[in-house]
Image (cartoon, coloured by chain):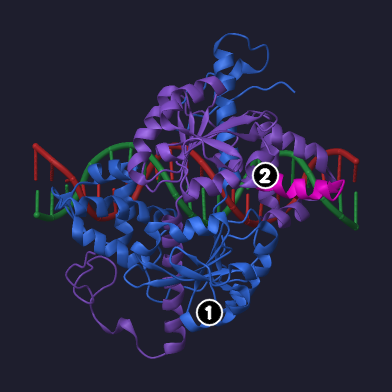
Chain colours: A blue, B purple, C red, D green
Amino acid sequence: MATGRTHRPATRSRGIPEATVARLPLYLRALTALSERSVPTVSSEELAAAAGVNSAKLRKDFSYLGSYGTRGVGYDVEYLVYQISRELGLTQDWPVVIVGIGNLGAALANYGGFASRGFRVAALIDADPAMAGKPVAGIPVQHADELEKIIEDNGVSIGVIATPAGAAQPVCDRLVAAGVTSILNFAPTVLTVPDGVDVRKVDLSIELQILAFHEQRKAGEERAAEGTGPTAATRGKESAKQGPDGDVPAVMPA
Amino acid sequence: MATGRTHRPATRSRGIPEATVARLPLYLRALTALSERSVPTVSSEELAAAAGVNSAKLRKDFSYLGSYGTRGVGYDVEYLVYQISRELGLTQDWPVVIVGIGNLGAALANYGGFASRGFRVAALIDADPAMAGKPVAGIPVQHADELEKIIEDNGVSIGVIATPAGAAQPVCDRLVAAGVTSILNFAPTVLTVPDGVDVRKVDLSIELQILAFHEQRKAGEERAAEGTGPTAATRGKESAKQGPDGDVPAVMPA
DNA sequence: GGATGTGAAATCATTCACAGCC
DNA sequence: GGCTGTGAATGATTTCACATCC
């Protein structure tokens, strides 16, 4: 998704699958924990367990980065930490602005893991003049009028939107116009952006609704097991492995 | 393995793909907005645009739910709202507990869209005795000692974890032991749960790292595009496999 | 012996393209 | 004429299983 650029990769082999990219931060976190405990090497099996994936997937993921392991031994923890950090672009510091300093924006500003690795909160921005100058997480809030100037002065390319839904698209437009090309959106709304700009969204209510779906399915299966099921429970045999994602029918009368 | 017979052509089997489930909340939100504007019907094209997906995907998604549209016309907004709500399990109210009432937990408690549709904050729980009784978002915080009792008394099956990373797994274990079967985890850590329990995670730093990866890639392409000159390819050192040599310093942990 | 790296197979998801109905 | 619903084609991701190397 997003993307649009179908340009051929000039240097070849930089084509890491999106699904793999999304797991690299997980591996990095697990590796960092091992590193802090001075563990020198780790096997794909152990690391996979720590990251919550299976080992075949992890090995395949790493194979896209290169051959960084040693057969019969495993992976060098420090070396892998460096390679993944580099791949993710964390060997440089990314200045980030957070727009919308309400409850959520303030919580994000205070979030420690933020500044710790690769990211730096360059500015907090809010539309409320009453907020201006007030320090949040030790950083004074600036007024939205300054947005463009802040982006340019700090060379910000990543913006976090934590405004109410109604303000998100206008804020997004201004961020993009000022040069931001990656946006993390916490507002419960779909953002429209030009090609070349990446948007990722974090949406509480979507996550809850997905959980509710599965929760309902579980409840339905339970009921069916109790032997009520008049309807379609007929073709429910279908097995299902023990995977965390079960499957199959949940019957619901209308 | 068992079965494997998954290519059932059946017209209405209840096996909705996970990817589709994840988009239903998006459709629902767009439809709710249309409903509030009293729009009676909508085409797949229009709705897809509002939800930020393409229309073929949307139609395919809806086809898993049933044939709820009218050829030549489109979908009845109210009817679809109801069908999707029902499919997601939102025609009932899910009591939810939030554990860990720091900055983030408080922000979540205050999040409006929470209570609005299908979910109800049954309790706020924190381990800090000083928090006990303090109202957050109009709800008094209760002490962690009460956790099991609260879960049981309210029939809570969905829990939200907003504690520091270190507390997340123990809290998770207690929630699960008390009967919670769906967890939304905001703590930056991998949770281990028994089969039958669903976990979804929301992780700021993972999202930022994914953005950084793409951001870095963009910067690289840009450089390559304008730089013209003979860049990296100059060396004979084949690409991919085999990393070190070139530009890889020893190690640089932090 | 032990664990990586990777083709090949299996599974899952998206997109195409058009028949079928209004 | 317009738009849905869906097989078939294509693409992406996961899993298998084993040759390969330390």
Q: Which residue is mark 1?
A: A150
Quadrant of the image occupied by residue A223? top right
The residues bearing labels 1 and 2 have C-alpha atoms spaced at a distance of 44 Å
Asked whether the viewer can see residue A1, the reply is yes
Is A70 above or below relative to B229?
above
- Please state which amino acid type lies under the numbered disc 1: Ile
Q: Position of residue A161 (x, y in %)?
A: 57, 63
Q: Which mark is residue B108?
A: none
Dividing the image into 4 quarters, which one contains the C terminus of chain B? bottom left
Tell me the chief SS of the magenta region. helix
Seen at 26% across and 55% down, the residue is A32
Q: Position of residue B152 (x, y in %)?
A: 51, 20
Asked whether the viewer can see residue A243, the reply is no
Q: Which residues are magenta?
A: B25-42
Q: Is residue A28 left or right of residue B31?
A: left
Residues marked 1 and 2, same chain: no
Q: Position of residue A200 (x, y in %)?
A: 54, 59
Q: Which residue is mark 2?
A: B60
Seen at 43% across and 29% down, the residue is B175
Specify the subunit that label 1 lies on: A
Q: Confirm whether the magenta stretch covers residue A164.
A: no
Q: Position of residue A19 (x, y in %)?
A: 44, 53
Task: Pick the residue in front: A70 or B135.
Answer: B135
- Please state which amino acid type lies under the numbered disc 2: Lys
Secondary element type, mark 1 = helix
**What count of labels does the image hold?**
2
